[in-house]
Image: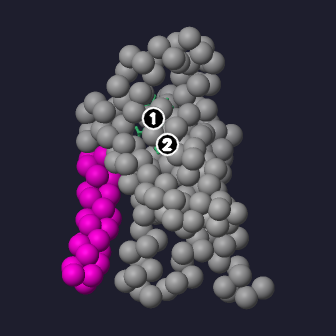
Amino acid sequence: MSVHKMLKPVVFIFCLLPLMMIMWQAFTNGLGANPAETILDAMGNWAVYFLLITLTVTPLRRLTGWGGIVRLRRMFGLFVFFYASLHLLSYIWFDQYFDWHEIVNDIIKRPFISLGFMTFVLLIPLMLTSNKAMIIRLKANWKRLHQLVYPIAIMATVHFFLMTRADFQQPVIIALILSVLLMYRLVVYFQKKAARL
Ligand code: HEM
């Protein structure tokens, strides 16, 4: 297999490492005093990290000229959904013990849960349309739909801020990285607009 062809499977394994690490810690009693919270937080964190990784692909391609990296973008995007689903499952299972009444109550009453829920709902159409057939079928609308990734990333970061009570270091770093990635898009947008004038 050529290096080019090996890239995708190798990156795929790397993307699964956070889950494997959590599973390893679970089997070796390494999840600390509150294993349920450790799993919930880790899955939420990795969903956000993969959002940032996905948003880094385009700038990296433009800055390095390495077109091949775009082939990884869909995989990174699907891992956002994967880890967000595990985060949601951990919440439903370990936090609420499948008490659907309590879950609906929580979604209605706690703003950070409402926001997390809305963020997750917005991820669903992106996941469902992330295949080649849908790209061809939706044409220009596909690009428009996938611009949802920007509000999704902002909402996920705000969800992180709202749930944080004491140490804001991590959400602040996430917000700073996201700002840089969004600013990059704005600059490119205005550059293109100016070129058209
Ligand atoms: C229905 C959807 C969601 C629910 C019910 C939910 C629930 C929660 C809960 C209960 C926590 C707090 C855990 C704690 O107190 O330690 C949390 C934290 C978090 N969530 Fe969500 N969430 C949802 C969606 C999302 C999505 C879509 C993302 C990202 C794409 C996300 C990212 C995070 C992050 C980064 C944290 C902070 C973890 C940390 O403390 O390090 N969540 N979420």
Q: Which mark is residue 122?
A: 2
Name the residue nearer the viewer: 28 or 119. 119
Q: Residue at x 36, y 42 (%)?
A: 155
Q: Which residues are magenta?
A: 169-197
9 in relation to 129, above or below: below
Q: Residues within 10 Å of mark 1 (few under 14, many from 20)?
A: some
Q: Which mark is residue 167?
A: none
Q: What amino acid is found at the position of numbered circle 1 in the picture?
A: Met
Residue 28 counted in the magenta span:
no
Image marks 2 and 1: residues in contact by CB distance under 8 Å: yes
Q: Is residue 195 visible?
A: yes
114 in relation to 182, above or below: above
Q: Residue at x 42, y 27 (%)?
A: 113
Q: Give the quadrant of the N terminus.
A: bottom right
Q: Which residue is mark 1?
A: 118
Q: Secondary structure at mark 1?
A: helix
Figure quadrant of residue 195: bottom left
Figure quadrant of residue 59: bottom left
Does mark 2 have its CB less than 8 Å from ligand 1?
no
Ligand 1's image quarter is top left
Name the residue nearer the viewer: 160 or 121. 121
192 in relation to 102, above or below: below
Q: Secondary structure at mark 2?
A: helix
88 relative position to 162: left or right: right
Q: Residues within 10 Å of mark 2 (few under 14, many from 20)?
A: some
Residue 193 counted in the magenta span:
yes
Residue 185, x across and y down, in percent: 31, 68
Q: Residue at x 23, y 73 (%)?
A: 190
Q: Give the quadrant of the C terminus.
A: bottom left
59 relative position to 186: left or right: right
Residue 31, x across and y down, in percent: 55, 37
